[in-house]
Amino acid sequence: MMRFAMELLSLPFLLLLALSFFSRPTVTIARGGGHMDCTHGVFARHLFEESQPRISEAMTHEYMSNSELEKAMKEFTQRCANISRIYSIGKSVKGIPLWVVEISDKPGQEEAEPAFKFIGNVHGDEPVGRELLISLANWLCDNYRKDPLATLIVNNVHLHVLPTMNPDGFALRRRGNANNVDLNRDFPDQFYPMNDIVSLRQPETRAIMNWIKERHFTASASLHGGALVANYPWDGSQDTRKQYVACPDDKTFRSMARLYSRSHYNMSLSKEFEGGITNGALWYPIYGGMQDWNYIHGGCFELTLEISDDKWPKANELPVIWEYNRMSMLNLVASLVKTGVHGRIFSSDKGRPLPASVVIQGIDIRVNASRTYGDYHRMLAPGERYEVTASMPGFQSKTTHILLEDEAMNLDFILSPEDSSKHEEVRNECDCTCDGKDKLEVVEFLRGINLGIYLLLSVMFLIFCCLLRRKTMFKFLNRRQFNGYKRSIVV
């Protein structure tokens, strides 16, 4: 027993204990701060709310209530039924459904297309996002087949819009949810393992985590208020210090953040943030944030967008804020088909789609293809050379080098099974579907020909089969081409 006590009091344990108690995120006004203290042996989440201004009834005037927001979403899907549907991903602490509107030319159907999600009102006292997302949905519906950008997005992207992640916090006019938990500090964190207690996840957090696991999102953004900047990973640091902490896809995230900032009316003119963008950990570290979890566990490239200096501006300012952010929101979604590397992965033996992984040399993040179509969508910064590898257990991996310019590239892979010999691969690749009668007729025909001609005809026959097989494969690979794709490559 004494030996056990001495081990507990060892230096590493004391250091870990000190880190758990004293390495707290910095308290700020813009993104909000939180601290973790130990209550009955469990790390609970509370907030410093003394500095939060009291939200008056006059401030909330003309903002949609939760019931009005739900009504607006359902009316939208009725008015725009040809390009939308509504569904719920779960419920809040108080049982309010977390409604999502999907916008696509084939809503509810799985396609070989990238998916983007917008999430608003993560913090209850930052309601601008929920209003802007309804405006975005209505704009897409009103301008579909009239405006090229609206048509591009609806036809080539599955856009999912969750106007409020925190309806309880909105109703209570406070940052946290009904349990007073900051939902943007509630996700498992790579730098703060004490935040990984699954049983403490809030229902809203669990709903987002399950949503990301069930659906194949390429990129996303959450809308916040209190500053004007596009924030990108990482949000925290190993030693909790305020410093630039680059994630593996730092170039790509900076490119996405710059796209949003430069499309905005005045975000890029910021005097506080160079170019209107910032690395999260450099601004100030947080732990348990949603964007880092999206990227690590879902391969989903998420930005945290601060879209209004005032957290709760007057409702008559919302049309102006919408106009300032409209092109930024549209261009960010459209970037899923205008940039990056996209393609499908197939098996060489039967031509079936493969849920293989796509890895970029030097970037330790995998993007997985879908099981249904084998399609993948990999966000990458333009103007760079990349080594791209597609791999899957049981198949031989394939690697190719590309130069990604300003437009998107279509890159398909055909993987061969590992357990097939070289001879078997050739035979399977050139196998023709002929019935027994046809084979007998071929044999009878060849009996009267000398060996040299027989061999020549055999070679020609194999070449013909290979070409026929290749034509069939390309026909299967053919799909609606995304606007902006520069060229198509099959590896």
Image: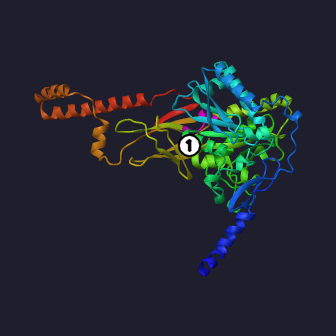
Name the residue nearer the viewer: 93 or 423.
Answer: 93
> Is 50 contained in the magenta span?
no
Instruction: Residue at 76%, 53% (x, y): give it.
Output: 46
In the displayed structure, 484 sits above or below 282; it is above
Residue type, mark 1 in image: Lys
Residue carrying label 1? 213
Residue 255 figure quarter: top right
Q: Residue 382, percent across and down?
A: 62, 41
Name the residue nearer the viewer: 263 or 156.
Answer: 156
Q: Residue 215, percent across and down?
A: 56, 38
The secondary element bearing badge 1 is classed as helix
Residue 268 figure quarter: top right
Horizontal side of residue 127 vs 254, given as left or right: right
Colouring rule applied to residues: rainbow
Total numbered circles: 1
Residue 142 figure quarter: top right
Quadrant of image for the N terminus: bottom right
Instruction: Residue at 30%, 40% (x, y): give it.
Output: 426
Task: State which region is magenta.
Answer: 335-341
Q: Residue 71, percent across and down?
A: 71, 25
One can see residue 218 in this view: yes
In the displayed structure, 121 sits above or below 37; it is above
Name the residue nearer the viewer: 485 or 294.
Answer: 294
Mark 1 neighbour density, 10 Å: few (under 14) some (14–19) many (20 or more):
few
One can see residue 306 in this view: no
Q: Residue 192, percent across and down?
A: 66, 58
In the displayed structure, 420 sits above or below 463; it is below
Quadrant of image for the C terminus: top left
